Image (cartoon, grey):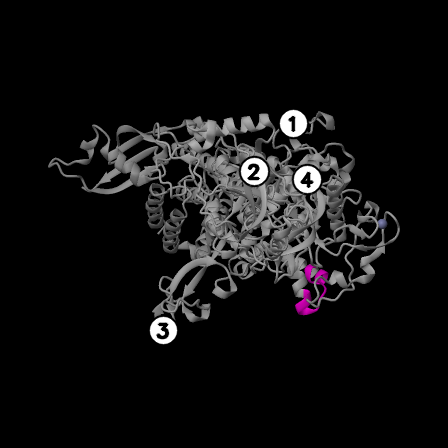
Amino acid sequence: MFKKSYFQNSIIYYYYCRHNSHSSSKHSKTFYKLYSTLSSTSSSLSSSNINFSEIERKWINKWKILKNHKKKISQQQKNDVNNNEKEKFYVLAMFPYPSGILHMGHVRVYTLSDTIARFRKMHGYDVIHPMGWDAFGLPAENAAMERNIHPADWTISNISLMKAQMEKILADFDWDREVTTCQPEYYKWTQYLFLQMYKANMAYQKEALVNWDPIDQTVLANEQVDSEGCSWRSGAKVERRKLKQWFFRIKDYAKDLLNDLDTLDKWPDRVKQMQRFWIGKSEGAEFDFVVNSGNYPFTAKIFTSRPDTIFGVQYLAISADHPLVSKDFLPQDKYSQVFEFANQIKQQQKVLDMNDENFWKGINTGMFATHPFTGLPIPLYIASYVISDYGTGAVMGVPAHDKRDWEFFNRNFHDNDDNNNNINIKRVVRPAKKQNKDDKDVKDVKDDDNKIFTSFGILTENCGKYAGLTSKEAMKKIVHDAHKSGYGRWSIQYRLRDWLISRQRYWGAPIPMIHCSNCDAVPVPESELPVLLPTDVSFTGRNGSPLKQAHDWINCKCPKCQGPAQRDTDTMDTFVDSSWYFMRYTDPKNNLLPFDKEKASELIPVDMYIGGVEHAILHLLYSRFFTKFMFKQGMYLPRNNNQNNNKNNVNNVQGQDEPFKQLVTQGMVHGKTFKDPITKRFLKPEEVDLTNPNNPIHISSGLTSLVSYEKMSKSKYNGVDPETTINKFGADATRLHILSKAPVSEVLEWEESSIVGIQRWILRVKRLVENIVENNHHLINNDNNSNNNLPTSYDQNFVCDLNLMSNEEKNTYRIINNTIKEVTTVFESSFSFNTAISSLIKLTNHLTNINIKNTSSVYEYGLRSLVKMIAPMAPSIGEEFWETLNNHKQQQQSSETGNEIKINTIFDESWPKVDEKAFSVEEVTCAVQIDGKMRFTIKLPTTMLHDNLLIESLIKKSKNNEKWFIDNNGNEKKIKKVIHVGGGKAVNFVFEK
Ligand SMILES: [Zn+2]
């Protein structure tokens, strides 16, 4: 029986090696199929089993004891200076919103961060792996309205629920560092940071047209409105309203936020690209157009990325709230008409796009600006498409060379031209012939006066002395000349706008400002922080924020003149809370400052940040902005600069004020979704017969239902509850499953049935572990062993003499080291855990199939390394196997140390090191016997030694040796059996007589 399954294993294993293509999930699927076939035919599997939940409970308890024990020790040693000289490693998973339920996406991200944290610990780092709660926000307030409980109570009870769930997934967080953003101990410092922004003139209040979410009844930042003009949270079509709001000057940091992206070489390109696009740098020039309409001249500055088209300007377009739209400037006869139009635009309740007729609305103001080059009068229009807070609120209209201008001109000009003149479109650039193929600036297009031409080309005779120049040459000359004459200059514009942080909601950090009729806006003195949220408010959902009704709270004294004043009733965007929480983790209990400078300087930047790609712009951009601000304020020094603790001595290294050195964005978890094949309606689980998993039947119609993987949602009935999965399969297997199913950044298609394959693998490792304890005497008594290779301690790295090894040992040693190499690379840099798990399964197969199981220390080293490498991904199983392996040793120790509690944890062990020597062995000499007689030797590559069939075919085909396998008639001799000795040391072919 053993022989049979052994044989099957080698074939399957060989197949697997041949078809192993790295990191594709397709490959892992094929592999699972193979693996399950292999397992189900193996006989002894059913005899043994694992009680996953029992092991998990056992280790959760042991870890608790261990943590308390370590805490005591570290408190005792507090006075020892520098007792921890290990290098720090700060690994961070994005903290969750405490909704009360951990979903599969959470399980995926925390499994990742926990695996990396545990690996780094074993690799000798002092690891910081904190967790907390992004606890302010609308759901709590909505729950309060629905269920009549205070948002604080709802939030706190959800936190305790989720904490328990996090324990169940075996995540080892530093709960000592826990932060909760809705607690006064935290938001006091969010308010403090607001005041620092205010003091630095980085926070300001202005009346502006803002995005209004009619469902959530609050304003939104631009980042929180999607490309369709809908709210990121409620999905409602966003409206425009004019309100007085607080802003952070993130735009002042646009240049650094953009340029420093180049220093983030461990960030996904996709995220950097999204930020670049959002910041939206455009290079061009600024020109001054003087308007001589009122009592005094007004200079309208306009920005263009195409200064070569300046001679094509046929109108200027200004925003509805441009300073020129006033009685001081508008011609009297036009005033009422223009003002009415401007008001109409300002009150527009919708964010417009090009498909909207209203987008193209405009009106001739009757004013003219003087063209700086030609001196000609240029009519001034108010255009709906010009927004005041982008650029200068005024743009030049060049209909011949810009699509939007072309549209606007054609729709508005003829109707609005007072004299009804047919105004021709003025072309200033014509297509140029390409000089050579590489000329990217020039497009080969036919010249057509009636068509818009937006590419670079040659300037026409309309451009005076610049005619005949290429666009590029002309830009340089035109801007140069304008600069000399004082009416133009090179300029850079950003799409990024200032961050609107006021929210008309209750459950957030109150903005620490007081409004006084004498002193205007006055900051709350730092000594009076926190401005606590009043608790005696009612959540009716009507009349705006509950804070507006909290009159006792609103009415206060002005800190400046002591007169009667009112508190600001808005709270801060919750993205402000999460923009600095990773700094608070470095010093979570500080009650004098947000964090101690020295403590933050030891840990920031975060070494590795893990979270969803959906935060590519909002949270990650805001956090970068805050960190840069805090750095500028001297609140911390970057870690690399620690030697230079003198503030004046800080080197100006680009990107040193970035918060996250490395960013890993994990893909979503998609659920298996069933649809009615005819109506395409989503089917509930009870509507589908899964007797044959490959053919799910829609019960009522009897037809095969459609199957797809989609984002988990209630309406699709495809959600998977992590707790149910963990109860069924165990947390270790669930974690391994998550890591093995897909590369980190890709979508994970949740397929429960394949967890069984992982369980079977764990079971096989368990059998190997038990087997070595039952049969291997090395563990019990080192002295009794004749093999000189045996390491004296298994807790140290295995050192051995290759010369004393048999071929099979050498080969095994090479495979072990190769696995260590592959797996370490995955844990350190590639994070393709699916390939790491494949490597570990391969090693398991090898260790299962070799002959030196009960005799060699190399084998034991391999098994111990295997268990160590599994442990960060499957921590309680890792601990359990390690304990079994050390059982005897531990018993000895505990009898020596008496009653003292001692728990050996695998996470105190060091990660196996790669021994490069192992790879020096490339070939071994194999003695070939024919019917028991030694006939010849052959060199075998070590890479083949695991595979007996391969060895045999190589021997049979080896040069000059074919004769041994051919009979006198030239036919292949029939082999009765083949005996392999020592994995390539010798092979004996026995032929039928
Ligand atoms: Zn005052």
Residue 687 image offset from top left, x and y in percent: 43, 71
Most extreme residue toward the bottom, as rendered? Answer: 700
Residue interval drawn in magenta = 144-155
Residue topped by disc 2: 303
Residue topped by disc 3: 701
Distance, label 3 to label 2, CA atoms, is 64 Å
Left-right relation of 921 to 642:
left
Mark closest to the chain's N terminus, 4 or 3: 4
Mark closest to the chain's N terminus, 3 or 2: 2
Tell me what residue is drawn at x 51 percent, y 58 percent: 729
On whether ligand 1 comes within 8 Å of the CB at mark 1, the answer is no
User: Mark 1 or mark 4: which is in front?
Assistant: 4
Q: Name the amino acid type tagged 4.
A: Tyr
Mark closest to the chain's N terminus, 1 or 2: 2
Q: Name the amino acid type tagged 3.
A: Ser
Distance, label 1 to label 3, CA atoms, is 70 Å
Residue topped by disc 1: 652
Most extreme residue toward the right, as rendered? Answer: 562
Residue 145 in magenta stretch: yes
Mark closest to the chain's N terminus, 4 or 2: 4
Distance, label 4 to label 3, CA atoms, is 80 Å
Secondary structure found at label 2: strand
Residue 789 image offset from top left, x and y in percent: 49, 31
Residue 899 appears in the rendering: no
Secondary structure found at label 4: loop
Q: Quadrant of residue 932?
A: top left
Distance, label 4 to label 2, CA atoms, is 23 Å
Q: Name the amino acid type tagged 2.
A: Phe
